[in-house]
Image (cartoon, rainbow, N blue to C red):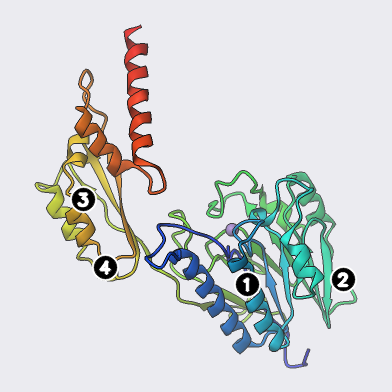
Amino acid sequence: VDEVGMKIVHLADTHLGFRQLRATDDGRNQREQDVYQAFGRAIERIVELAPAAVVHAGDLFDGYHPSSAALGVALDGIAELRKGGIPIIVIAGNHSTPRFASAEHVFAILDRFETAEAVWREPRTVRIGDLAVHAIPHQREPELLVEQLRAAAPDPNARFNVLVAHLGLEGLPLVGGGESNAISLTGGDIEHAGGFDYIALGHLHIHAGVRENAAYAGSLERLNWHDTATKKGILEVDLEADPWSDHFLVFHELPARAQIELDPIDASQVPDLNAAIVQAAQRDGLDAAIVRLPIDNATPADIAAIDRRAFESAFAHCLHAEIDADVLPAPSGSRPAPRELREFLLVAKPDNVDADEFVARAEAYLARADEEMAG
Ligand SMILES: [Mn+2]
């Protein structure tokens, strides 16, 4: 640790092993590869920045039983940091916490082979020269996490004190969320930690400041449609700078796959829905992007009349394109003919669901509704 400054890098929510969309022709999952590449680029940038330490604020892996590919990418990245003499502290997030206490934790392996300072189950303070990193991993019980946050106190013998935690805060969108395992705390809970030089947070996938000395780094890739972040990257923190100054926190943007929600088409207003769909695909910036096209006020007949082939070919330059239809209820007393119903269901169906099963279930629900209404 030199005397020029004390800079650390904060990243989070890398979700190695995340998969989405179909596999490519070579059998690999493109989104999984995107996430690995984003992590690799982050590691490269960190090596260039040469910080005194790196803190990873949770969800290093997408799950608690990472594939050997995901584990390999993590170990490769950590090895690069080690070559640069840069220690890394990683904490367990909700995605990397087994639901059963008896399950072996992948962090046990990182720790055992001294690759990273991996912190799970119990909070632990890692000392690196003048820097004390107070690492508080995810807990299944919110009360326990709050208790541990309140108990955390800066080490008076360390020149710099950093707190790392993985949690949601009330009032902030739950972009990491929707998960049963996630925890949200109030702003007051984090105020208890105000004595730290910096609080490195994970869980919210959109980079955001929480107070002058606390921030979410955000994820490196957009992993769902809730993630409307305009930029992805990592945070460089100069612990010697004034927290109110511009150089205390520097966000280093890194490239990520574009995820674009197009302007909605109002099906009740356009003369030719198929032409409007093809028109929407002409927008700039859609190359290799993940694209969603909302269609509002569509009748089941509008949806059934969508030309799937024209749609696929208009959006062929995208990695993935999908229609997000907001369908008006069918007029009462009527019911779609079986063929129309099937066509509509195939448009509405999620990617990973079997078509025949989806249609069969819908037919069963309709039959039940008929019975109930007749009875
Ligand atoms: Mn996450």
Res 155 label = 2
Q: Amino acid at mark 3?
A: Arg
Check disc 4 and report the residue beneath it. Answer: 317
Query: Do the numbered discs 3 and 1 sit on residues whose CB atoms are within 8 Å?
Result: no
Residue appearing at x 22%, y 23% in the figure: 335
Closest to the camera, between mark 4 and mark 2, is 4
Quadrant containing the N terminus in the rendered view: bottom right
Query: Do the numbered discs 4 and 3 sit on residues whose CB atoms are within 8 Å?
Result: no
Q: Earlier in the sequence, mark 4 or mark 1?
A: 1
Q: Earlier in the sequence, mark 2 or mark 1?
A: 1
Where, by quadrant of the figure, is residue 76 drawn? bottom right
Ligand 1: quadrant of the figure: bottom right
Q: Amino acid at mark 4?
A: His
Closest to the camera, between mark 3 and mark 1, is 1
- Disc 4 crowd, CA 10 A, few/some/many (<14, 14-19, 20+): some
Q: Earlier in the sequence, mark 3 or mark 2?
A: 2
CA separation, marks 4 and 1? 31 Å
Q: Position of residue 332 (x, y in %)?
A: 23, 20
Please state if 53 lies on the left or on the right of 236 as rendered: right
CA separation, marks 2 and 1? 35 Å
Check disc 1 and report the residue beneath it. Answer: 72
Say what secondary structure mark 3 lies in.
Answer: helix
Say what secondary structure mark 1 lies in.
Answer: helix
Quadrant containing the C terminus in the rendered view: top left
Q: Position of residue 154 (x, y in %)?
A: 84, 68
- Taking depth in this image into account, of 225 and 320 the one nearest to the observer is 320
CA separation, marks 4 and 2? 54 Å
CA separation, marks 4 and 3? 15 Å
Q: Position of residue 93 (x, y in %)?
A: 67, 57
